[in-house]
Each structure stands twice: as structure tokens, then as C-alpha cells.
Amino acid sequence: MGHYRQSLTQPDRPRPGPATTTGSTLLQPLSNAVRLPIDQVNFVVCQLFALLAAIWFRTYLHSSKTSSFIRHVVATLLGLYLALFCFGWYALHFVVQSGISYYIMIIIGVENMHKYCFVFALGYLTMCQITRVYIFDYGQYSADFSGPMMIITQKITSLAYEIHDGMFRKEEELTPSQRCLAVRRMPSLLEYLSYNCNFMGILAGPLCSYKDYITFIEGRSYQLTQSEANGKEDVKYEQTDPSPNIAVTQKLLICGLSLLFHMTVTKTLPVEYNIDDNFRATVSLPMRIIYLYVSLMAARPKYYFAWTLADAINNAAGFGFRGYDKNGASRWDLISNLRIQHIEFSTSFKMFLDNWNIQTALWLKRVCYERASFSPTIQTFILSAIWHGVYPGYYLTFLTGVLMTLAARAMRNNIRHHFVESPPVKLCYDVITWIATQVAISYTVVPFVLLSVNPSFMFYSSWYFCLHIACILVLLILPLKRTQKGSIEQESIKPSWPKKLEEEENVLGQNNYSTTNNSFNQKQEITCRYPALKQ
């Protein structure tokens, strides 16, 4: 499911006492005035500062005006300052985790460093999460430094695998996406820290590939490649930097609306009310279903706010440009983390997951699913649960998610084709599947919000575990799609990835963005955003 946990994006629940923070208390008067915890105020103010800094960075430290070294240094120092302001001495964990991971990469060597970096980074994150949750403040979110560490862990592990792919594995062993993302030289310590701790993404991400980031810093983001008519070679030419102003303005408008919704409507629809004894005893089943959907829908705008603001910050700095659409309009969604319209109107479990926390889904695919030797679906969901944290509710959500994913795909493969030929029938089918999807998603993520075992089981038992049972029956009754060899087809059981993004990783047409110094021939079997970068 891939929720991002940072202060503002956390579920609201009563705190047993005054909220404390190891970060700066400079904004305590503002915190008192708006009646929000100081850690949430620090997060929002630092992100707004990062937005202004991004505009300054793009204007005065543009790659055409200064060196990559200066851009790396400034991006890193600003990022560490924001982390220090929000989390105080806890920000040292970001440097320690990154520094030790870099040391592991240097001393272990490219053959096995990806395994050691993966185990260390995930283990360090888990240790910090256990300490924060079970030693300091269970259920509280002051000084939640583990949120940024989750993003840094993604970056550490992604880059380790990309270096392993580029410097050790043979070209023919790589999948097309691995070939595109492969990094073919060891980054310097400055480049590594800049990638992990830059001010644009240290507080709320999102994850980006190392190649995309280095290309942005070095000012090659707008370098186009087009094949000549004879298809023998590519010709590069420089494009005037497109302005991100419209994209940033649109995203800030979405942020404002999401924050307004969160501050007004969300607080009146607590998810915890779904397990209230009086509510369960007095409200009819249809109304309980409606409230379940509405309460979980109302919990999403805080994620919309945090992720869209993070995307806007990167765009304001000039990072995130992904070419032009068919109408010639610039696209600034290279590292976007969600598509709100597709989420709210999703008609399948897959469609919801395809558009929710997109970058984390891609990370899970690249470091786990594609490389798993057995049970890739289960391994991927387990990794997702471990990465999110140590609250039992996370594991209940992801275990339920495994069942939901398998059952939803089985039903879609066996049923959908009967309803797509007639427009009126398909409309009815879409309405029914929209209702079913929204209820299933809400049912699945309740433990993620409630966190603890007892409230989660109280909720599921009040529903008699009906959707769990339904999923098991579907898997027992409906056949899974099979290949010609008779084995279960991988497509029918793998987690949902953003298919559109995955396709565009491989083929972006003639407006193909190069992060390279050498480009693929048009006659080659794959064209991607990263033609043969010696990086």
C-alpha cells in the first residue's frame, strides 16, 4: 500500500501529554496559535522554506551558472539543516546510515555490496523504528525521524542494486528496466550524500533514481535525443528549459485544498469510530459500510498534501521534467507519487495500487519482486510491511493485502471480459467494481490506521472477517491464469505496479529523455530514458 509516515501524514489520535520534539521550538508560538503539534508545524514550515529554496536554487544556482560541485554542496547542506531543524540530534541518523552504507559499498565490492547494503539499511531503519515506537512514544509522532529514514533506505538499497547491475552483472542478464537504471561508476561521497539528503526530498521524498538526480544536478535533464531517419544513430540537441511554474502552481493548489479538507472534514470523521461499541450496536450495516468508506477517504488528503507538496518542491528546483505530451505541453510527473483522480475513481484493487505511492511500488518491484527466487508476491508484501515499521497493524494490512491482490486478479481474469463489449453493461460493471474496490481498500487499511492488534481484530471481527473469507473462497473456486506450460502465470499474482510508468521507463517515443553521454540505436530492442549512461 505504501503509505508515507511523516508528522503531518500520520493518523490523528490523542496524545497522553503535551507533545514534545527534539527539533527546534522556534515556532512554538505559531504551533500554539494554530493548535497543531510543534513537529507538524516544523514539517510544514520547513517544506515551505524548501519550496522557496528550490526556486532560488533553480534561478541562481542553475547548472548553466555554477558547477555540479556547488549544486551538490548547497543541496546537501540545506537538506541537513532542514533535518536538524525538524528532528534535532535525530538527524544524525540520516548521516550515519548513509555514511556506513557508503563505507560498505567501498569495502565489500560490487559483487555482494547490494546484499550487505540492503540488510544494513533495512536493519538500521528497523532498529530506529523499534526504539522510537516501543521505547520512547508508542502511538505518538513527535520527532518521527523514521519517516525520512524510510526514503533514505529506499535510495541506499536502490543505488546499491543499480551499481551491482551496472558494474558486475553482464548486460544480457539484466531486464530492460535494470539495464536502463544501471550505474556504471561508483559515486563520490558528496554525490552519495547529495542524493540521499538533498533539501528537495529529505523530509518527504519522493524516491527518485540516482541517474535522474545526477542528470538534474549536471543540467542534462532537458537534453533530447531523436533518431535520424535512417535509424543509424541518435542526434542530441539542447532544449530551452521548460518552466515548471504552471505545474508547481497547480500542485500547490491541490496542496491547499487537501490541507483545508484535512483541517476541517477529516477531524470530524475519525477512523476509530468504526470500532465504537455504540456505533456498531446502533447503526445499520449499509450505514456502517458508508461510514467505513467515507472515514478512510477522509484520511487520504493528508497524504495528498505531503506528497504533492514534495513533488512541487522538486519541480520548483527544475527536477521532475519528463518530456512533452502529444499536445506539446510539458510534463512534470517524472517522480510524482500519486494520481488523485485515478485513486478516488479506481475500479479495481490494481488500479488503486497503480496510482498510490508510485515510487515506493517501483522500489519494491526493482529491489524485491524482480529479484525474488520464490514467492515474489509474498516476499514483496513482507518487505513493504517491514519497511513501513513495527506496528502490528501494518502487518495485518499487508497480509490482508496479499489476499485482496490475489483474489482481485483472479476475479478480473475470469469475469471482466464478459462485461466489456456492451457500453451500458460495462458502465454497470464499472459502478459495481468501483463500490467493491473502495470498500475492499477501506477494509484492508483500517489496521494500518489503528496500529494495534486488539483494535484491528475488533474491527475485523465486527465484520466477521467477511472479506478475508470471500477472498479465500475466490482463490479456491476461480482458476488462476495459466501459461502454456501449465504453471501459474506470473502476471496473475504479482503486485500491481504503475504499468504506464513501467512502459514509459522502456519506451518514451521520440521525446526520449537522455541521462546519458551515449545513446541507443533505434534498431535496438529497447529504448529507455537512460541510454547507456556511463555513470
Image (cartoon, rainbow, N blue to C red):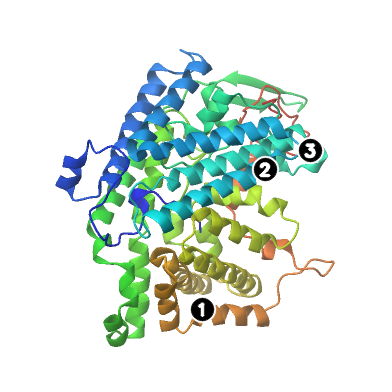
Q: Position of residue 116 (x, y in %)?
A: 67, 43
Q: Please report the residue visible at 35 percent of the width from the left and 49 percent of the height from the top.
A: 7
Mark 2 or 3: the one toward you: 2
SS at circle 2: helix
Q: Is residue 340 left or right of residue 21?
A: right
Residues under numbered marks 2 and 3 in contact, where contact means CB atoms less than 8 Å apart: no
Q: Which mark is residue 116?
A: 2
Depth check: 376 or 450 in front? Answer: 450
- Residue 436 drawn at (x, y percent): 47, 73
Mark 3 element type: loop
Residue toward you, 227 or 73: 73
Q: Which mark is residue 467?
A: 1
- Distance from the alpha carbon under mark 1 to that under mark 3: 44 Å
Q: Percent position (x, y) of residue 479?
A: 71, 77
The mark nearer the N terminus, 1 or 3, is 3
Q: CA distance from mark 2 to mark 3?
A: 17 Å
The residue shown at (70%, 73%) is: 480
The amino acid beneath tag 2 is Tyr
Q: Is residue 24 visible?
A: yes
Q: Which mark, residue 376? A: none
CA separation in Å, label 1 and label 2: 39 Å
Q: Amino acid at mark 3?
A: Arg
Q: Which residue is mark 3?
A: 169
